[in-house]
Structures are given as structure tokens and as C-alpha cells.
Image: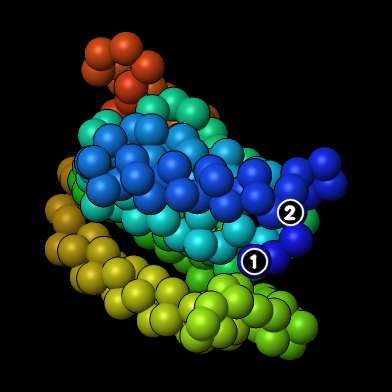
Amino acid sequence: MTSPMPGTTEREIANILEAAAAAQRSRDWRTCADLYRTAFDLLGPESGYEALGNFTTILRALRITPPGTGDIAFMRRILRTDANSPLHRALCGFTIGSLYSLEGHLQAAASRFRRSIAIAESASGADRDAVAMSGPPQVRVSALLDELLRILREDLASIEGRLSKWTPLERRCASIGAQASTRIVPRTKGRGRISLVEEDQSVV
């Protein structure tokens, strides 16, 4: 296990991850996601890929529908913070983009995918040589980044193909919708839940 943040013991982190795994087995996805978020924050910006990977997988698999407001804010914070590794930032951008795509907001999704690709491609040699999961087996960041880039490029190409078939009216409507908001706007569905809507392409 990678070193946790000061003041946090490896045993405490292990207990959180064990509780998250138990919640996953019982299909308590909300508790599971919250525990993985906590584990990632305690592990620090250079660590915690396993926790973040599990958290984002829960959202992309639509285990929590729609995601909570805190889920989106958590990923956007990671995406915007340079102290986080390129792998973590690109993974969060990919997940946000995937959620946009699932709701049909293709331009917003494409924007997130392009940014995530740029972040992943900017990883230094030291970034790529780092160990993401100590295993066994040991997994280096380079392997995870390369796989994420492959998926991002495929998904972006698919979205761009769909966008190329839009009519002028559809493009105009999407543009107006994007200009009407400068951030992710929650569309309330029950308590503390949101459905993503289109945001301005210059944001994030």
C-alpha cells in the first residue's frame, strides 16, 4: 500500500477499503462510493488509484443514478488540481465526460474527453514510471494511462462521428444551451441527487 496522508495509519486506510468492499458485496453503492472517496482523500494526491478507480467505475456503471452533487464536485476538484497525478485527473475527466455522453450532451462529453487526452499525454516519464498499484501483481501508471488513452480516443471518435451528423439546427440548439450555463447545473431529482445538464465548453 502507498503511504497515507500524515496522521493516518495504513491500518485505518485498510479498514476503510475493507468496509468499501463489504458495501460493494451487499450492493450498498452509495456507502461504497463514499468510502472510496474518503480513502482517496486520506491517501493523498499521489496515491489512491485503486480507491479512485473503484469510485469512478461505480458512477460510469450507473450504480448511483443520478450521481450526488458531492460526487461531481469531488471529481472536478481532482481534475482541476495540478497536484494530482495525470492518471487521476484524466480518469475523473473521462468519467465526467462519460456521464455527459450518457445523458446525450455530446459536445460537453467531447470537451471533457479532449481535455483528459491532453492531460494523459502530458504525463512525464517519472509520472509514467510510478507504481499505481503495488499488487501483486505490480501495475505501473504507464499501463493504466495507455489503456485509458485508448478508450478516450475511441469514445471521442464515436462522439465526433455522431456530432458530424447533426443538422445546423441541432448544432445551434446545443450552442445556445451551452451558453446559457457556465457550470454544471443540478436538475434536482429527489434529495441530494442531480442529473447533469450541458455546461459552457470553456469551463473545467
Q: Residue at x 34, y 33 (%)?
A: 30
The image quadrant that residue 184 belongs to is: top left
Q: Position of residue 115 (x, y in %)?
A: 53, 62
Circles 1 and 2: CB distance less than 8 Å? Answer: yes
Q: Residue furthest right?
A: 6
Give the Cα distance between marks 1 and 2: 8 Å
Q: Nearer the viewer, residue 128 or 169?
A: 128
Q: Position of residue 129 (x, y in %)?
A: 69, 86
Q: Residue at x 49, y 29 (%)?
A: 70
Q: Quadrant of the N terminus?
A: bottom right
Q: Is the residue marked by circle 2 packed among few (<14), some (14-19), or many (20+) residues within 10 Å?
A: many
Q: Is residue 68 toward the left or the right of residue 154 in the image?
A: right
Q: Position of residue 7 (x, y in %)?
A: 82, 41
Q: Amino acid at mark 1?
A: Met
Q: Amino acid at mark 2?
A: Pro
Per the image, label 1 sits on a secondary structure element best described as loop
* Disc ID at residue 4: 2
Placement of 73 over or under 42, stated as above or below: above
Q: Residue at x 34, y 69 (%)?
A: 156
Task: Check disc 1 and report the residue beneath it.
Answer: 1
